[in-house]
Image (spheres, helix red, strand yellow):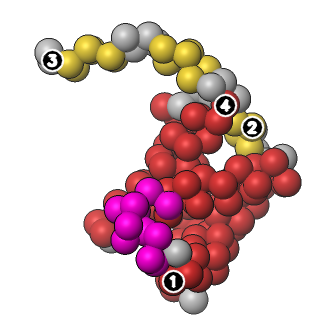
Amino acid sequence: MKKILRMIIFSGVAIFLTALWNKGFVIKQDPMIYLKTALLIAAVYYLVLPISKLILLPLNIISLGLVSVIFYSVVLFFLFDRFNLITVKEWTFSGLKFFSLVVNEMKISRTLNIFISSFSISTIINLLEKII
C-alpha cells in the first residue's frame, strides 16, 4: 500500500514538473485532474510496464532500451488521447544558454513533444524512486 501511494505521489510530482518546463504539455489547474492523471500513470507504471519489460526484453537488449522508451511513449499517447486529461500540443522552445552551451530556438511537433513528455515523466519518477 505504501509503495502504491508513493507511486501516485511521484506521478503527480512528475506531471506537475513536466507541465512547468514544457509549455506544450498542458494540464488544467484542477486538483481532481491531477489526481486522476496521477492514478492512471501510476497504474500504467506498475501494471503495464513490468509486463512489457518482460515481453520486450530481447528487443530492449538489441536496441539498448530504445524499444522501452517508444513503448512508454505510445502508452502515454493513448492514455492522453483516451481520457482527455492532458493536452500535448506543439510548441516553440525559446532556446537555452547555459555557460558555453547554446541551444537555439526550435519548433517541437506534437509527436516529438509526446516523446519528450513521456521521457520527462519517466525520468522524474525514476529519480524520485532512487532518491526516496
Asked if residue 47 is positioned above or below residue 98 in the image, the reply reads below
- Sequence-first tag of 2 and 3: 2
Image x and y of residue 89, in percent: 70, 29
Give the structural element (helix, strand or loop) at label 1: helix
Q: Write down the residue under mark 4.
A: 110
Q: Which residue is at the front of the view, 124 or 10?
A: 124
Amino acid type, callout 2 = Thr
Give the structural element (helix, strand or loop) at label 2: strand
Furthest-bottom residue in view? 1
Amino acid type, callout 3 = Phe
The range drawn in magenta is 57-67
Amino acid type, callout 4 = Arg
Q: Write down the residue under mark 3.
A: 99
Q: Which residue is at the front of the view, 88 or 132?
A: 88
* Badge 3 density bin: few <14, some 14–19, many ≥20, Cα 10 Å: few
Which image quarter holds the C terminus?
bottom left
The nearer-to-camera label among 4 and 1 is 1
